[in-house]
Amino acid sequence: MIPKKLMNMLWSVIKTYLLTRAPGVWMLRVGVGIVLFFVFMALLAPWISPYDPTKRVADPFLPPSREYPMGTNRIGQDVLSRIIWGSRIVLYVVFLATALSMAIGIPLGLISGYYGGKLDRVLSMVMDSMYAFPALILAIAIAAVLGPSPSNTAIAIAFVYVPTYFRMIRGQTLSIKSSLYVDAARALGASDNTIMSKYILPNLAHTVLVVFTLSVTDAILTEAGLSYLGLSVTVPTPDWGYDLRAGQPFLLDGKWWLVFFPGLMVMLLAMGFALIGEALSERISLAQTR
Amino acid sequence: MARGLGYYILVRALMIIPTILILYTIVFILLRLLPGDPILAVVGTRHIPPEQLEHLRRIAGLDKPPYIQYFEYLWNVFHGDFGVTLAIPMGKPVKDYIFTRFPATLELTIFSFIVSVGLGLLTGTIAAIKRGTVIDTGMRLYSIIAYTLFIPWFGLMLQYFFGLILGILPTSGRLDPGIKVESITGLYVLDSILTGNSRALASALAHLVLPSITLGIVLSGAYTRLVRNNLVDILSMDFIRSYHARGISRGKIVWYALKNAFIPVITLMGLQFAILLGGAILTETTFSWPGMGTFIVDRIDYRDYNSIQGAIIFFAFFVSIISLIVDIIYALLDPRVKY
């Protein structure tokens, strides 16, 4: 039963968002296309990767050719294979990080906005201070203490994006809290928990979706940044940011492919989510003003 | 008005204190209470005598209970003491590094800031004037692409093109080898102007071009959006229509509208500054720019948490002060701000 319900929901989402003639729908389609491309790349890595990403398969520093479409690196590993496998790391880190920051930020924002009072003031102050501080620098500090591993990177990223969710949810809760239907629910004797979970939370879904796509964009760039600085993975794990850094010393010898391809992937993936976020936020703000 | 503004600034300045305390506390908790002993991390696998470990603990201030460390460090920070380095060279005050490295970061951020605001205003204005056309869509795409550029990648691609293929711009450092500039402020451009050293000025500016374009373009996307949307709103207002009716030229009208669109841009500048500093770390690493970012990254390699903590707390102060300045500018420009 549930899978069918889920399928119907999925279909209705696809229908309302992707199969319309609304202006700007092309952005959404391109964005979804890019994201799906990388998701499948990660899922199918063992089958589509031409070589083992951690093994030496040819001479080092071979420029892109038919056999090695993105060339080989300093050790003679195939760059394309490393990029395909690298998509797993970045997607894993980014989704774990986003799920963690949502799991902390959304309930805190909801409670803080709904109950108000001293707790709200303290939480808001802490979150605002964190929000004002450079996210990357804070993430660097946390990742440096925890040590390099993809899960630790995810924790570091999750930590710095909690305030983003908190602030958004808190603000929305504050405005929804005073609406008539919430008053009505309260008059009918609904408990605080019921009001929060059944009356307020569902109305935040659209906001969460937009903030999600935009924070995933940031998280991708932060993950790449941390791993570029050597704070995410260790040798020989394939990872875009890390591989880019490894190729950097050879760039000005003319070995552009070591830097060009990994960085391009970071940008494409980030752009996929940015396009979705842009299109969704436009659509939702249109729907609200109408 | 003058008294009201003074009062506002005072209240706003006092509000910095809790912000700094919160950030300090977060950083302190993170660096001290997360798993891992900072001393053993520096020492690594080397075997050193216990008395030397004790000595290290003492100079790092780690020999006391955490709550005493908390207040002691805070007290030191308010006196400008950000602790000492724990790795090579050991025992050097972090303050000294901040003193030499921070001006480099500041110079880079100032130039990147100019590039990003300039480009943002330009592209946003073009998009607003050409609203609804292909150019508008193009500018929108520009803002998305700029935002999603990965700084090291973009910087390295610029290095490859302008440094290697064209060979016209330097790709690392702040000055050509052999050129020296007397350090007054630490901002080489300013110092070389002050000392009338035109060779150093040319060299410093040339070294700034690629890093500040890299960081500037990446951050310009957010301005493009904001300027465009504001300008579109303002250009459809009644007072603009009355300018048209009076026959004022289009260029002048856009200029008047821009002035009105500028206030939200200032708010964004405050928020963007934090992102600018984060981006500066990556930009500095990409361009071997000897600033705070490369300092932090170097110290990470040594696992020198004491230095990292000092640098990050310094950043906390700096960010708070910048947000204070932005708020004051905002209050000066927008008479509607309530004191």
Image (cartoon, helix red, strand yellow):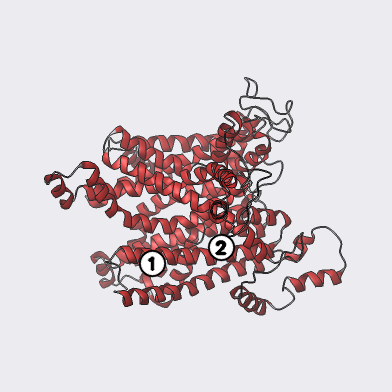
Which is in the foreground here, disc 2 or disc 1? 1
Judging from the image, mark 1 belongs to the subunit labelled: B
- The relative height of residue B46 versus residue A86 in the rendered view (above or below) is below
Front-most of residues B16 and A176: B16
What residue is disc 1 on?
B328
> Image quarter for residue A169?
bottom left
Q: Earlier in the sequence, mark 2 or mark 1?
A: 2
Give the amino acid type for the residue marked by disc 2 in the picture: Phe
Left or right: A116 as drawn, with respect to B181: left
Q: Tell me if residue A9 can be seen.
A: no
Q: Horizontal and vertical percent for residue A254?
A: 65, 29
Q: Residue at x 65, y 78 (%)?
A: B72
Where residue A18 appears, as percent x and y from the top left, is: 34, 37
- Which quadrant, please, contains the N terminus of chain B? bottom left
Residue placed furthest toward the top? A66
- The residue type indicated by label 1 comes to Ile
Instruction: Between residue A145 and residue B11, name the one nearer to us.
Output: B11
The secondary structure type at the circle numbered 2 is helix
Mark 1: few/some/many CA within 10 Å (<14, 14-19, 20+): some
Residue beneath disc 2: B315
Question: Could you say where residue A156 lies in the image, as x and y percent from the top left?
Answer: 58, 57
